[in-house]
Amino acid sequence: MKTLSIKQPWAELILQGRKKIEIRKWNTNFRGEFLIHSSQIPDKESMEKFGFRNLPLGFIVGKVKLINVKIYENDEEFLGDENLHLAGKGWGNKGFILKDPQRIKKIKAKGNLGFWEFGEKTTLEQQVKLASSSEEIVEIYKYIKPFNLDYPDYDEWVEKCKKELESDYKKAYYVKKGSDISGVIIFQPYKKGGDMLEIKNFRVSLADKKEGIGSLLYNSLELYAKKQNFKIIQVDTHSDGMVEFLLKKGFNIIKKETLYSPSQMETILQKNIGDKK
């Protein structure tokens, strides 16, 4: 079940019905019921402000429904809801509007960034996530930054990629094992328009390549592309291993050319995912 880690005393204030809006710097498309996880480290200043001394830390403590997200355009709007979110300026401008908080029997658990899945048995398929928060984008940025693979101006591209993920022009699926990312696939609409989706970065950690993470990431991408009515997926690579992987996924080699460096040949592949007549 989706879970959100919230520092104390804010988790307790939500359960008491006193805090009806959770403020975040990142947005989400998720709507529905989620579990409340009390973070291991409390907000000590706010604990004192609201008169709390001992509250559970590092536990699933309840559940609540997220029914909408309110974007605060200015300080006046933010301060107008102060009795609902109880927060100060600088916490963010995305207000998660909450409903029907319920306490549950405490369950010890480690937290995570953004919305995360809680459950004793979590399959790899359930761990594939579409990045939606600033915290997730920062994690992806840190993960892909060391993977240069001889691309010129790679560091500049990574910085640009981070900004385009934040603007939602680029999107990314990723898989985490424990607290670490083990694979990511980044994609965007074809720059010249049309019904083509481009894979711009596809990485799986060496230690996890035999676990099928690459296939899970690609399958999630293809499903997304079909739902968004894209007809073609395109990718370029100079990795023989990646070419072999993509051919097994139904891609065809279109051509080879020097895209990024005159001394390095890239293989361009495409897969038609449109309805076959």
Image (cartoon, rainbow, N blue to C red):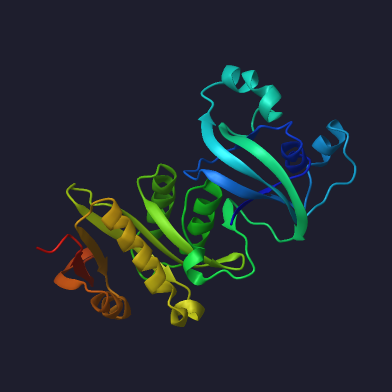
Residue 160 in the figure: left or right of residue 192: right
Asked whether 126 or 211 is in front, the reply is 126
> In the figure, residue 76 lies in which quadrant?
top right
Q: Position of residue 168 (x, y in %)?
A: 39, 44
Q: Position of residue 259 (x, y in %)?
A: 21, 63
Q: How many marks?
A: 0
Asked whether 91 or 257 is in front, the reply is 91
Q: Residue at x 13, y 64 (%)?
A: 276
Asked whether 228 or 252 is in front, the reply is 228
Asked whether 234 or 265 is in front, the reply is 234
Q: Residue at x 54, y 57 (%)?
A: 139
Q: Residue at x 20, y 69 (%)?
A: 269
Q: In this rendering, does residue 219 appear at all?
A: yes
Q: Residue at x 23, y 61 (%)?
A: 233
Classify 42 as above or below 112.
Answer: above
Q: In this rendering, does residue 200 appear at all?
A: no
Q: Position of residue 171 (x, y in %)?
A: 38, 52
Residue 33 in the figure: left or right of residue 82: left
Q: Position of residue 257 (x, y in %)?
A: 16, 68
Q: Residue farthest to the left?
A: 277
Q: Quadrant of the C terminus?
A: bottom left
Residue 214 in the figure: left or right of residue 240: right
Classify 63 as above or below 108.
Answer: above
